[in-house]
Image (spheres, coloured by chain):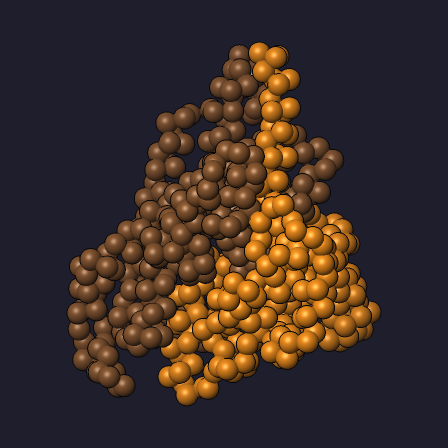
Amino acid sequence: MTAIRRFLPGWLSTYAVLYLLFLYLPVIFLPIFSINTAATPKFPLSGVTLHWYEDLPRTPALIDATWNSLIVGISASILSTVLGILAARSITRYRYPGRRTINGLIMAPLVLPEVIVAISMLLVMLQLGLSLSLFTVVLGHVLVCIPYSMTVLTSGFEGFDRSLEEASADLGETAFGTFRRVTLPMVAPAIISSLLVCFTISLDEFIIAFFLTGTEATLPIYIWGQLRFAAKLPGVLALGTLLLFASFVLMTIAEILRRRAARRTQNEGGLYA
Amino acid sequence: MTVAAEGSPPFRLAGSRRSPLLQSEAVQGFALISPTFVYALILLVLPILVVIAHSFWTQNYLTIDHTFTLENYRIALTEPIYRDLLWRSLYISLTVSLLTVALAYPIAYFISFHGGRHKSLWLFLITIPFWTSYLLRVMSWKVILGYNGVLNSGLMGLGVIDEPSTALLYNSSAVIITLTHAWATFAILPIFVSLEKVDRTLVEAATDLGDGPLRSFLRVTLPLSAPGVISAALIVMIPTVGDYVTPKLVGGKDGVMIANAIQAQFGKASNWPLGAALSVTTMIIVSLMAGATVLVIRALQRLAR
């Protein structure tokens, strides 16, 4: 029995490492083949080049798509974080009937098939006579970003010591003054973290943008269009590598900030809870 | 995921001495959440209602005939092409959710019970690939499984096969592998959270009472983590049934799923009511399958005790 007990964690940690490999390996092939001289992604590499990266800034359609993605990402992250702040604050600070139902509804886009969410929004927007544009993409992205924003923000707001706010109110601050001078500084890391998470999601999101955009492409839509041409694959791999890198950096900063926010309010959990 | 919703104290009814204050608290809380709530109502609930309404109407070239009909549902359920796509989507999403949960459980267990100081580092490492673009991850599987891809060229380099295998890409197995990879993190986190909640003294008690590690795992830890297993299964099953990108990129002709047919109705075929009926049917059937999965896991949980 003790043999099994000693053997088990060893076996489990081997499995854990293999699992991490399974998670990371596919993703790592993108950067590897993006510096390959041959256009087909196969081993052995035929030579190393940065040629595909140098071509990227010379593609006007790609520059447009980058601008579109930035516009959509920034608008969507600000809007969804504002709506997330209101909702997370309400959920963590107040008790009222229907709270859990409303929370469930706001979190629902997380567990619904994206295609169905996208086509339902498409139907309503066409019925309302909205013409499809980057604006409709932002509307869609905000809906799918709010659940993530809520998760990050509730972990920042939870366990927040209410007596600090009460003290501020007792000392004569107005409700707004208390929020600006006591609450906001405490939760600022969580808010920035939410902005970064939402921006990353919007930057990478494909399905909703695919259905709700008019003629303007975001980066994932541009990639989708290029995938039809085998010769364009290395360029797509190079672009994909840059996107992977951007997501990785943004999410690492977001996670560090979220942890700092959670520590300030002495609360653990967050994205994992 | 709903951190805040847990453990709310029972709402005190009006009539107690503090009722005006409490009432104003309820009003304030509701007022604060209402913009987000209204947003979700307009862009989620209303659209879904519009889809349901459309599913009972008929497309008449460019206009929509608003007379009530069940014709779309008859087509969705009896036309062989849609029936096959629906069955395949259900089969793929069920397989993917079982696979993901089975592969994720040991990891979640390892992090929770043996993670030690590095728990949050492990969780971070596991969440990172999930934050990279879904489209890019599917694309990398195309690179791996393709005719001239990594796996084929690697196997040929090792002398295992003489010519590239075409069996790797463009079938439902490729879809299953890709989806299992894409949804891994979504399965690990809920299982991890429920394992964290397992009272360690219960496991010790089982050991003290003579259960070996395997028996105490099967009779204590596993049943107690069933809620996490359930939410992991559901969180993977429901979205994957409607996946569009994966079947389109790696599925080929044999891996087409229902979402591709739904998209076609809203695009080229331009038959919104049929597309709407296909969406509603998919959601209802996958909910039934999810419900059945919950019942099966609960029954297994009772058996294990």
Query: Residue A61, how many percent across, how many down?
Result: 60, 78
Q: Identify the residue at horizontal 73%, vertical 76% (top origin).
A: A176
- Name the residue located 29 percent from the left edge and 74 percent from the top edge: B269
Q: Quadrant of residue A5?
A: top right
> Which chain corresponds to the colour brown?
B
In the image, residue B279 sits, relative to residue A267, either above or below, namely below
The structure residue drawn at horizontal position 37% and vertical position 45%, both measured from the top left corner, is B94
Q: How many marks?
A: 0
State the image coordinates of residue B31 (x, y, percent, origin top left).
56, 74
Q: Position of residue A124 (x, y in %)?
A: 40, 79
Pick the front one: A130 or B259: B259
- Pick the front one: A174 or A105: A105
Q: Is residue B91 left or right of residue A211?
A: left
- Rendered orange, the chain in question is A
The image quadrant of residue B158 is: top right
Residue B260, placed above or below residue A210: above
Residue at image location 57% in from the left, 74% down from the top: A218
Where residue B217 sits: x, y (%)?
51, 24
Q: A97 or A215, which lies in front?
A: A215
Q: Furthest residue to the right?
A: A171
* Front-most of residues A167 and B3: B3
Q: Quadrant of residue B297?
A: top left
